[in-house]
Image (spheres, helix red, strand yellow):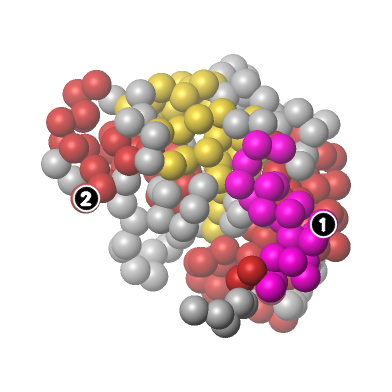
Amino acid sequence: MYIRQIALRADKKKELKQSYLASIPALQKLDALSLSKPVTFFVGENGSGKSTFLEGIAVASGFNAEGGSKNFTFSSRDTHSKLHEYLRIARGIPFAKDGFFLRAESFYNVASNVDEMEEEGAGFSSSSLYDSYGGVSLHAQSHGESFIALVQNRFWGNGLYILDEPEAALSPARQLALLALIHGLVRKNSQFIIATHSPILMAYPDADIFVLDETGIQKTPYERTEHYFITKRFLDQPQRMLEELLDDKE
């Protein structure tokens, strides 16, 4: 495990409670969270703090707040929280040889930065930076295609990969394709930490699922997550659920 534990620094607890992050119950109640599986999911309702938590872990691990590898240093707008300053990351040995922070909301900026680096390196090397991203600019591919191309070509294994809502650009079929790619990388000694709403991704075998809510951060079996329950109920009885939802009776 490249990341074995995420803990709140004891000397920062008071400062955290005085910041706006104190309004996120799951983070306020964080003490120490141990990671023991190659794939870990953080799930929860919108506003539960899962993306903020994931961002804090990524930045505390040396990644750029907007995404990319540790070599990415661009900043289009400084909007990330200070959570990384309050976290202590316990790393395993050996260290990861590769890594990437993928977040759906700022992926456009990452793609633009790749284009800029490719233009700056033109003429200095016989190889193209695009070779690691599917052979063409990420902007020249659809959103979903560029996500898959990134994982397929840029994630080399022996790495730490932190993904924030990767399903945002992916159809159900592409989510299944992503699961297969994740599994291949796990077999190459990789660790994934993923924030998601997708019950498809969450079904990855033997993964740990942590639910963030007002009670804190709790490890939860797949079948007991709200994501699984609601999706299964809808697929089992779509017409009944729609009738209940769209009932116009007062």
Labels in figure, total: 2
Q: Position of residue 192 (x, y in %)?
A: 65, 38
Residue at the (68%, 47%) spot, across then down: 229
Q: Residue at x 47, y 47 (%)?
A: 50
Considering only vertical position in the picture, is 214 above or below 237? above
- The label on residue 104 is none
Query: Dividing the picture into quarters, in which one does residue 14 lie?
Result: top left
Residue drawn at (74%, 66%) of the image: 240
Residue 160 inside the magenta-drawn segment: no
Q: Secondary structure at mark 1?
A: helix
Residue 86 in view: yes
The type of residue carrying mark 2 is Tyr
Between 229 and 134, the one nearer to me in the picture: 229
Q: Residue at x 76, y 28 (%)?
A: 206
What residue did someone put label 1 on? Answer: 236
Percent position of residue 145, x then y? 77, 70
| Residue 158 in view, yes or no | no
Q: 132 or 167, which lies in front?
A: 167
Of the residues under marks 2 and 1, which one precedes in the sequence? 2
Q: Which residues are magenta?
A: 223-243
